[in-house]
Image (spheres, grey):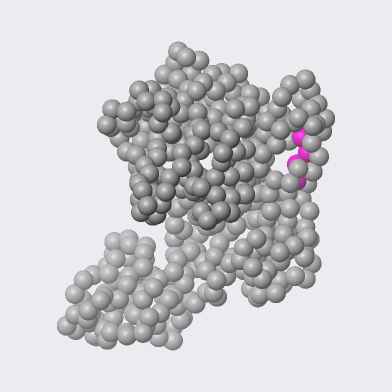
């Protein structure tokens, strides 16, 4: 959920700023937390800008960022990507320890968060998976079949507890690359060499990308293809699409203190394809202050009717400008203990319902493979690996070639052909 959404939402009960779309707004936004769970931990800093009614994000680079532990130990953070500052890979937060974020921008502005003491989080007592063949997808419309994920948690007695849940779903991909007006080339294509005036010449150096038709035909080059086309390429090795939770799932134990939280729904897994999928559930503890902030954030982003109904505002978090306490800094730096649970869902309980197919869901069309020889493609490469090649997996926020922990390989399904139901 982006902080641009946050800027354009409405709230009236806590610190905020309002703007008229005709004027300029420039708000510093901070996004991040420390946790005792696995994986890299980072903080993102950017500016959310609105000018003449148009919103945008500019990452904040070259800041000096550090984490202060128990008001004594200072851990520098490293900018590995523009505007993204990482803690050392060996760092792991501790329950009961106090954490504070501090940073200084390139222009000399200095900021700090409030001190967060990491609260404990109970284990997930049980995880339930229930399939409903008639439940529709959230998006795209027109499809149905959903696995819902529920948890049971034994809430500790005689203390206030605040929770949040997030999830990540891994779906194995069959198709890895799409080439528009081109073909996938495993090796580089040598410029200016055109065997028989029909082919492009393959070199020996790795390329692993789409080689597109030049905008203008060179002398001796293959004939120019005037109509647009798309070729899709299957994956050479394992590749997984990543779906992350998009909404907040918050809970306080005010009415269940010391009791058992039963069947808390924390995820929906649409029936995209016949093969199974892996889901990782993350259960976090929150401080009372963090819960209050994220609850207000949830209310204003989910209940806001748009600019026409509510004045746009930006929600002030727990980070302040040391020299100017009136500056509104959006975002909240939290310290949260975490429980991670992974479960493979084999989808053998889906009956006769045929899913649409993962490629169709992602692209809203069926795949169009490069034709196998002796059929002729729009572009031809001489030498190099045989046609049609398979493509490598792209490493992005939404795709990975790294086998997820807990993944189970299954036989190729025979009952399914991608068809809309």
Taking the image as shown, residue 284 lies to the left or right of residue 381, namely: right
Q: Is residue 270 above or below residue 77?
A: below
Q: Please identify the quarter of the rendering in which residue 14 is found.
A: top right
Query: Along the line of sight, which residue is nearer the eye, 292 or 182?
Result: 292
Taking the image as shown, residue 220 lies to the left or right of residue 169, namely: left
Q: Residue furthest top?
A: 72
Q: Is residue 161 above or below residue 374?
A: above
| Residue 248 part of the magenta segment | no
Give the x, y percent position of residue 186: 36, 66
Residue beneath the point at 40% across and 37% down: 28
Give the x, y percent position of residue 274: 68, 65
Quarter placement of the C terminus: bottom right
Query: Taking the image as drawn, is residue 17 in sight?
Result: yes
Taking the image as shown, residue 238 lies to the left or right of residue 256, namely: left
Give the x, y percent position of residue 357: 62, 68
Residue beneath the point at 36% across and 42% down: 26
Q: Please identify the quarter of the rendering in which residue 258 is found.
A: top right
Q: Please identify the quarter of the rendering in which residue 418 is found.
A: bottom right
Q: Provide the residue span drawn in magenta.
A: 150-155
Query: Along the line of sight, which residue is nearer the eye, 116 or 322?
Result: 322
Query: Along the line of sight, which residue is nearer the eye, 356 or 294?
Result: 294
């Amino acid at each position: 959920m982006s902080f641009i959404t946050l800027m354009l939402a409405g709230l009236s009960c806590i610190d905020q700023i309002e703007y008229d779309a005709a004027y300029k707004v420039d708000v510093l936004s901070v996004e991040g937390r420390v946790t005792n769970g696995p994986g890299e931990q980072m903080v993102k800093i950017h500016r959310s800008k609105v000018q003449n009614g148009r919103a945008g994000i500019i990452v904040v680079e070259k800041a000096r960022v550090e984490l202060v532990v128990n008001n004594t130990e200072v851990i520098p953070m490293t900018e590995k990507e523009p505007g993204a500052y990482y803690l050392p890979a060996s760092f792991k937060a501790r329950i009961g320890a106090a954490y504070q974020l501090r940073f200084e921008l390139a222009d000399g502005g200095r900021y700090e968060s409030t001190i967060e003491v990491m609260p404990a989080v109970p284990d997930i007592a049980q995880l339930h998976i229930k399939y409903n063949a008639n439940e529709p997808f959230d998006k795209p419309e027109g499809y149905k079949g959903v696995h819902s994920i529920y948890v049971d948690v034994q809430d500790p007695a005689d203390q206030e507890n605040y929770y949040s849940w997030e999830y990540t779903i891994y779906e194995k991909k069959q198709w890895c690359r799409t080439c528009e007006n081109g073909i996938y080339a495993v090796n580089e294509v040598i410029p200016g060499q055109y065997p028989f005036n029909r082919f492009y010449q393959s070199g020996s150096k790795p390329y692993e990308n789409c080689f597109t038709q030049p905008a203008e035909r060179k002398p001796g080059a293959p004939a120019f293809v005037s109509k647009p086309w798309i070729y899709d390429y299957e994956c050479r090795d394992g590749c997984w699409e990543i779906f992350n939770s998009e909404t907040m799932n918050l809970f306080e134990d005010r009415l269940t203190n010391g009791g058992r939280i039963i069947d808390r729904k924390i995820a929906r897994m649409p029936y995209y394809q016949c093969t199974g999928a892996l889901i990782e559930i993350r259960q976090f503890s929150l401080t009372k202050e963090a819960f209050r902030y994220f609850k207000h954030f949830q209310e204003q982003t989910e209940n806001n009717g748009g600019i026409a109904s509510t004045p746009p505002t930006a929600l002030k978090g727990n980070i302040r400008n040391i020299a100017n306490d009136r500056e509104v800094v959006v975002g909240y730096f939290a310290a949260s203990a975490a429980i991670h649970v992974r479960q493979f869902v084999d989808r053998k309980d889906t009956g006769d319902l045929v899913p649409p197919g993962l490629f169709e869901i992602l692209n809203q069309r069926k795949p169009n493979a490069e034709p196998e020889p002796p059929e002729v493609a729009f572009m031809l490469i001489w030498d190099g690996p045989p046609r049609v090649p398979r493509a490598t997996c792209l490493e992005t926020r939404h795709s990975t070639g790294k086998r997820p922990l807990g993944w189970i390989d299954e036989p190729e399904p025979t009952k399914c052909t991608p068809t809309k139901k």
